Amino acid sequence: MNILVCIKQVPGTSKVEVDPVTGVLKRDGVDSKMNPYDLYALETALKIKEQTESNIKVITMGPPQAKEVIKEAFAMGADEGVLISDRRFAGADVLATSYTLSQGVRQAGDFHIIVCGKQTTDGDTAQVGPEMAEYLNIPHIANVRNILEINEREITVEMDMGETIEVAHIKYPCLITVEKDIFQPRLPSYKKKKATRDREIKMISLDDFHDRDEKIYGLNGSPTQVERIFPPDSNIEREFWKDSSEDIVKKLHMKLKGLKFI
């Protein structure tokens, strides 16, 4: 079985500057890490590999330094890595990103299952996985919280639907997005890190795609425009009150009223 896991390099800090013109994050020179939700996706693939004879390939889209998250995936047990990298992909919104990834997946080889994390910490849209599946014209299931059964034709999963838990069967090839804590991600292995430090990472650019129309990639191909984006304000203001319960309730009421919460 061939498993493809989508991973992403995201800022390792919340203190990231925003380009005032394009509204996109300035990632250069910022400490980065693998998207935490993608760790659950990779662990899901590794659990499937423990039950079946599988090959795990990770794929990511980003600048050349995004190779680091692929190397981290190698240290956790991934077999192959693909980096989609081209300056013409910069500034892509969710739709353009999904299309770019779908084109990269077509170049990455055959697969049975694509596993994605629920969302990324730098976007939080939770849309890329399902949109990729639509572009690839394959069935997909989101909110997967457990893998119940795997056979040669299909995978059976549990979905967290908020108020209910549903069971679904999905035939290959397919895409699933997994919830946080579906499995506890393992730590990277130092031995595997040493053994895979020279492992080849396949590079893919726009020139390798079947569809090379530059107008549909990156900022040019993004139909949504960011009106305003800003880092969250850091508010550490606090008050301590020592009084009787009755007086504290009165103070709290007046405070909330003054802030126009009530």
Image: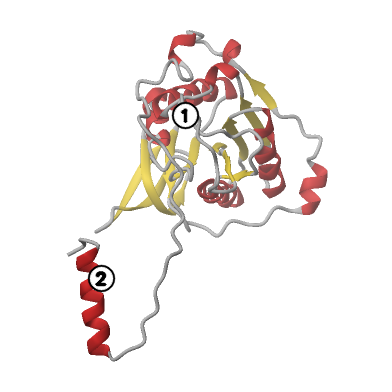
Q: CA distance from mark 2 to mark 1?
A: 36 Å
Nearer to us in this view, 102 or 171: 102
Three-letter amino acid code at the position of disc 2: Lys
Report which residue position mark 2 lands on: 255
How packed mark 2 is, by other alpha carbons closer than 10 Å (few <14, some 14-19, many 20 or more), is: few
In the image, residue 10 lies at what x, y percent? 56, 41
**Relative to 223, 247 lies left or right:** left
In the image, residue 209 lies at what x, y percent? 55, 13
In the image, residue 76 lies at what x, y percent? 68, 49
In the image, residue 130 lies at what x, y percent? 38, 34
Q: Secondary structure at mark 1?
A: loop
Mark 2 or 1, closer to the camera: 2
Q: Secondary structure at mark 2?
A: helix
Q: Quadrant of the C terminus?
A: bottom left
Report which residue position mark 1 lands on: 20
> Would you identify the image quadrant in which residue 84 lies?
top right
How packed mark 1 is, by other alpha carbons closer than 10 Å (few <14, some 14-19, many 20 or more), is: few
**Relative to 160, 1 lies left or right:** right
User: Residue at 47% of width from left, 17% of height from top?
Assistant: 217
Q: Quadrant of the N terminus?
A: top right
Pointers 2 and 1 in contact (C-beta within 8 Å): no
Q: Which mark is residue 31?
A: none
